[in-house]
């Protein structure tokens, strides 16, 4: 990935990145392609952990999760139609995930929204790129110890998940889905699943898509 020079958007204060669908006046400046950074590369400003907040650190320009179950929620507002992208790296045996259309909760597994799985070698057979418990991927080209790019795109009821530019999930949600595992609107969250795993996220960004 190209490195930016000068004052890149990745280092803007995340406090200025409140961008809720119902607050268009708060929309921050985006780059020429419409992307807005959600992580300043230095601090966890704009993010809030629930259980075990000590699990989450910033190291070498990346958000790092270690330890027992914890979820780190983005506080930049609610999103409906969007494209979300981040670079991810796991260590052997790590189970993580990227939640979307979710909301902050004090403990437990997030009850609202969907999860894009992050798992290369942990025992769960559902691997990186899966739409967890909806569309399962059992083999992934992602590798522990190497950065990959994971992208989530939501347009209406249509979800696509890509790993290193390759679409691995292409799913249209039925209108009659019950429970919390469905599309609505919400924020993003990173998961640290259990002790022994280490996950890293960097270059975290989103662009809002015009509703059709």
Image: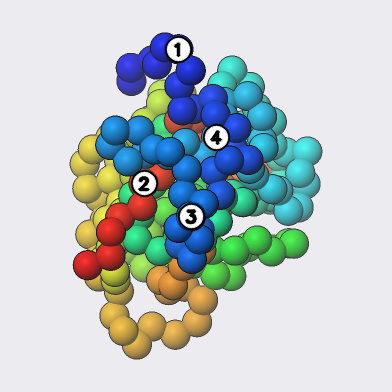
Mark 2 vs mark 4, CA separation in Å: 14 Å
Disc 2 target residue:
207
Image coordinates of residue 161 in percent, x first then y, are 30, 51
Image coordinates of residue 178 in percent, x first then y, are 44, 85
Disc 4 target residue:
39
Residue in the image at 49% along x and 27% along y: 10
Mark 1 vs mark 3, CA separation in Å: 27 Å
Considering depth in this image, is 114 or 157 the residue closer to the camera? 157
Q: Nearer the viewer, mark 2 or mark 1?
A: 1
Relative to 96, is 139 on the left or the right? Answer: left
Residue in the image at 36% along x and 52% along y: 208
Mark 2 vs mark 1, CA separation in Å: 22 Å
Residue in the image at 36% along x and 68% along y: 134
Q: Which mark is residue 6?
A: 1
What secondary structure is marked by label 2?
strand
Q: Nearer the viewer, mark 4 or mark 1?
A: 1
């Amino acid at each position: 990935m190209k490195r930016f020079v000068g004052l890149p958007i990745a280092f803007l204060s995340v406090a200025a990145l409140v961008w809720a669908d119902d607050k268009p006046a708060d929309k921050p400046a985006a780059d020429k392609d419409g992307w807005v950074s959600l992580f300043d590369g230095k601090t966890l400003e704009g993010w809030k952990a629930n259980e075990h907040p000590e699990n989450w650190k910033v190291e070498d320009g990346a958000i790092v999760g270690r330890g027992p179950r914890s979820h780190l929620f983005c506080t930049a507002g609610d999103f409906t139609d969007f494209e979300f992208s981040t670079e991810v790296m796991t260590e052997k045996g790590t189970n993580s995930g990227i939640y979307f259309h979710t909301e902050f909760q004090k403990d437990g597994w997030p009850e609202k929204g969907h999860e894009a799985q992050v798992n290369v070698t942990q025992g769960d057979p559902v691997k990186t790129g899966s739409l967890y418990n909806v569309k399962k991927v059992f083999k992934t080209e992602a590798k522990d110890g190497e950065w990959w790019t994971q992208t989530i795109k939501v347009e209406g009821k249509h979800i696509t998940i890509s790993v290193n530019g390759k679409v691995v999930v292409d799913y249209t949600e039925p209108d009659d889905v019950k429970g919390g595992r469905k599309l609505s609107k919400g924020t993003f969250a990173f998961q640290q699943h259990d002790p022994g795993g280490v996950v890293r996220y960097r270059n975290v960004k989103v662009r809002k898509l015009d509703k059709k």
